[in-house]
Amino acid sequence: MSSDISVIVPVYNEEQTLAAFYACLSKVIDSQAETFEVIFVNDGSKDQTESMLRQLRQHDQRVKLVHFSRNFGHQMAITAGINLAQGRACIVIDGDLQDPPEAIPDMLQLWRSGFDVVYGVRKERHGEDSFKLLTASLFYKILSKLARIEIPQNVGDFRLLDRKVIDALKSIPERNRFVRGLVSWVGYKQTYLPYERNARHAGETKYPFWKMLKFAIDGITSF
Ligand code: UDP
Ligand code: MG
């Protein structure tokens, strides 16, 4: 029998954050009424991430693993997770504890009350340098001027999607996927959940400047 909720976690070289993330996530999902699967998409990690994931899998049957043959990028990892999710809803969450698993119960509550998309909206962003904050806010400003659809500002990929939305996303043949844009674009009943964005638990951002730039170009040219 498939699980009620699929948690999708893209990970790239996260050996320093994985144990803490898993501990926090499992505590949260243990407290919920639904059954869960946790899909880790290992985006071509070169550190101990893969073997650590295999160990998690051995003692927790809710854990499912996808290993990419190389680094394809965050958006591709999320897309693979969404395509494989079997739940009636999925939650996409970063593996570095910047998106707090503690917000998941509130997301689920909004879903139970009838929403199809629950965006995590960043109230505060801790531990990010002013360059990142400036370029991010500039990017969202430019995007909102150029895009034909409303893409909410200060929203990352931390969100819940109902099965209806998952199926709609799966039917879109777009290749360079700017997932947060596609989610706004498909419609359905959408709402927000404000949360405090923490500093990364450990390690460094896996989004160096050139990856951010490619991400921004994909977002702007797609929408
Ligand atoms: N990530 C990924 N592939 C990449 C870059 C990042 O799967 O090529 C994962 C990463 O492990 C993390 C999430 O995507 O779980 C967000 O990346 P990161 O925290 O480095 O980005 P930032 O929060 O600095 O924007
Ligand atoms: Mg991060």
Image (cartoon, grey):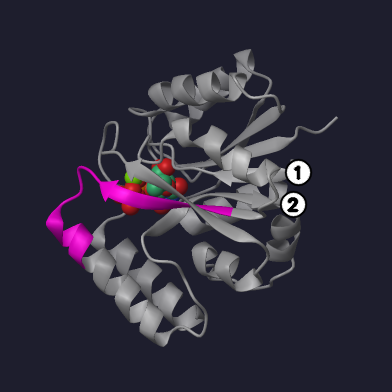
Residue located 37% across and 85% down the image: 145
- Give, as a single range, the part of the protein colored magenta: 118-134
Reply yes or no: does residue 125 show up in magenta. yes
Q: Secondary structure at mark 1?
A: loop
Looking at numbered disc 1 in the image, what kind of residue is underneath it? Arg
Label 1 sits on residue = 88
Is 63 situated above or below 11? above
Label 2 sits on residue = 163
Q: Of label 1 and label 2, which has the lower sequence position?
A: 1
Residue located 59% across and 71% down the image: 175
Residue 24, position in %: x, y? 45, 23
Is 156 situated above or below 37? below
What crowding class fits label 1: few (fewer than 14 Cα within 10 Å), some (14-19), or many (20 or more)? some
Q: Is residue 167 left or right of residue 91?
A: right
Residue 98, position in %: x, y? 35, 40
Residue 158, position in %: x, y? 48, 48
Residue located 70% across and 59% down the image: 165
Residue located 26% across and 48% down the image: 125
